[in-house]
Amino acid sequence: MILIFLGPPGSGKGTQAKRLADKMGFPHIALGDILRESIRLGDEVGLLAKGFVEAGKLVPDEVTIRITRERIAKPDCQRGFILDGFPRSLNQALALDETLKGADYRVVYFDVPLQAVIERNAGRWSCPNCGAVYHVKFNPPKQAGICDRCGEKLYQRKDDNEEVIKTRFVVYEQQTTPLIEYYSKKGKLVKLEAEATISEVNERLQKALGI
Ligand code: AMP
C-alpha cells in the first residue's frame, strides 16, 4: 500500500503518518525530517537545503526528487510506505508518477481551516532525537519540554515562528494546492476532515482507508 499525505503545514499529517506507519509496519518517509537531519549533520544536502527550510521555501526539486527516489527504492519500501511532505508541487507529483511506474497509490488530503493550522504550528514542539511532535495545548508531553518517548529535550523548529509560518502558507497555497485537483482528477484523492483530536482523526483515517 502506497500512501501520500497531503495538507497544509500543521494539518496533522505528520502525526497521523507516524501512527499509521507504526501500526502497519511501513516506513514513514517525511521529507522535512530527512532535510532537517541533513542540516543537523551539515552534509551536502543540508548545506544546500538550510536557507530554504529556515525561510519556509521549497528546497529545489532536483534535491527532493532525488532523495525521494533513493529512499523509496530501498527494500523496506517494497510492502508499502507513507510519503509525508512529498510531493509539494506539480513538478514533484509528475516525477513521483514516473518513479512509481503505474503502481497504485492513494492520496489522503488533510482538510483543516486556515485559522486552526496557524495555531497548531505556533504551539508545536519537536524531539530532535526520535522525531516525536507535541503541542503545548493539544498534545502536551507528560513533562514540559521533555520527550515522552525518548527523554530528549524538546525544541521549537526554526520555521515554526510567525513570519516563516506565513511564508510556508503562501508556498502551500501557490505550489501545493494544485495537487488537490491533480489527484482528484486521477481518482486518487481521499478527503479527510482533519480538524478534530488526534485519535478522532486517526479513526477517520483508518475508516476512510478501510484498514
Ligand atoms: P515539513 O517538515 O514537511 O513542514 O517541511 C519543512 C520544510 O522542508 C519545508 O518548509 C521545505 O523547506 C522543506 N521541504 C519538505 N518537503 C519538501 C518538498 N517536497 N519539496 C521541497 N521542500 C520541502
Image (spheres, grey):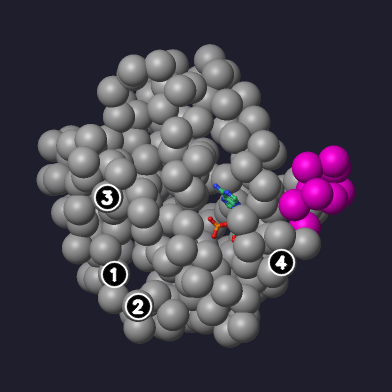
Q: CA distance from mark 2 to mark 1?
A: 6 Å
Q: Which residue is mark 1?
A: 112
First along the sequence among labels 2 and 4: 4
Q: Is residue 142 visible?
A: no
Q: Which residue is mark 3?
A: 181
| Residue contact at pointers 2 and 1, CB within 8 angstroms | yes
Q: Position of residue 161 (x, y in %)?
A: 62, 80
Q: Which residue is mark 4?
A: 54
Q: Position of residue 4 (x, y in %)?
A: 37, 40
Q: Quadrant of residue 43?
A: top right
Q: Which residue is mark 2?
A: 114
Q: The residue under label 1 is which amino acid type? A: Val
The crowd level at tag 3 (other Cα within 10 Å; few <14, some 14-19, many 20+) is: few
Q: The residue under label 3 is which amino acid type? A: Glu
Q: Which residue shows up at 53% across the image and 57% down it?
A: 132
- Residue depth check, mark 4 versus mark 3: number of the one nearer the observer: 3
